[in-house]
Image: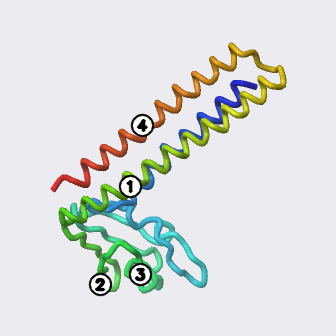
Amino acid sequence: MVELILDEAREKMDKAVVHARHEFASIRTGRAAPALVEKLMVEYYGSDVPLQQLANISVPEARTLVVSPYDKGSLAAVEKAIRNSDLGLNPSNDGNVIRLTFPVLTGERRKELVKVVKQMAEENRVSARNARRTARSDLEALEKDGELSKDDLARAEKEIDTLTQAVEGRIDDALSQKETELLED
């Protein structure tokens, strides 16, 4: 039972790390990256569909993304979704593909993005801590019911704390990598 609780906590904490990395990938760094637009929702024949399902997204140059819709009829809808997004990009449409050119970020904007990324990291750390809290309360309930000794409880809690620290370290590593990426010219 203890292993089940620990495995569940480990799984939730790993999801927090994966989520943090995914969120970090969606923050613009001045370089073109498909992750910035692939989750954009495009209204396609009456339903919202992620852009990655409607088009091929490539990076021919460091600051350029090319979006090639599989269905040329969806070109206008894709362009509209990009224009209406919060990316601040102006798509250029040549009738076959959409080109997105990323302007160089200003120093002030870079600092704002670092603050946003730090906030995302903190939210994911809190998520990991919540998984720890849930696991601890489950373990304490087992101990209260007499299914777990005090020594086993202490051992399991120590393992959860170690796991939480490791997960927070992984989130911090991803954060520092993204900060470096954001602050470099």
Residue closest to the far right: 145
State the residue position of label 4: 170
Kindly state the secondary structure of the residue where label 4 is placed: helix
Residue type marked 1: Ala
State the residue position of label 1: 25
Q: Nearer the viewer, residue 23 or 73?
A: 23
> Callout 1: 10 Å neighbours few (<14), some, many (20+)?
some
Q: Nearer the viewer, residue 87 or 66?
A: 87
Which quadrant, please, contains the C terminus? bottom left
Tag nearer the camera, 4 or 1: 4
- Give the quarter of the image for residue 171: top left
> Callout 4: 10 Å neighbours few (<14), some, many (20+)?
some
- The span from disc 2 to disc 1 (Cα, nearest Å) is 28 Å
Q: Is residue 93 left or right of residue 138?
A: left
Tag nearer the camera, 4 or 3: 4
Tag nearer the camera, 4 or 2: 4
Residue name at image x 76 percent, y 25 percent:
1
> Callout 2: 10 Å neighbours few (<14), some, many (20+)?
few
First in sequence: mark 4 or mark 2? 2
Residue type marked 2: Asp
- Asked whether the beta carbons under mark 3 and mark 1 sit within 8 Å of each other, the answer is no
Where residue 22 sits: x, y (%)?
45, 53
Residue type marked 3: Asn
Kindly state the secondary structure of the residue where label 3 is placed: helix
Kindly state the secondary structure of the residue where label 2 is placed: loop
- Give the quarter of the image for residue 4: top right
> Callout 3: 10 Å neighbours few (<14), some, many (20+)?
few
Residue name at image x 64 percent, y 31 percent:
7
First in sequence: mark 3 or mark 1? 1
State the residue position of label 2: 94
State the residue position of label 3: 84
- The span from disc 4 to disc 1 (Cα, nearest Å) is 15 Å
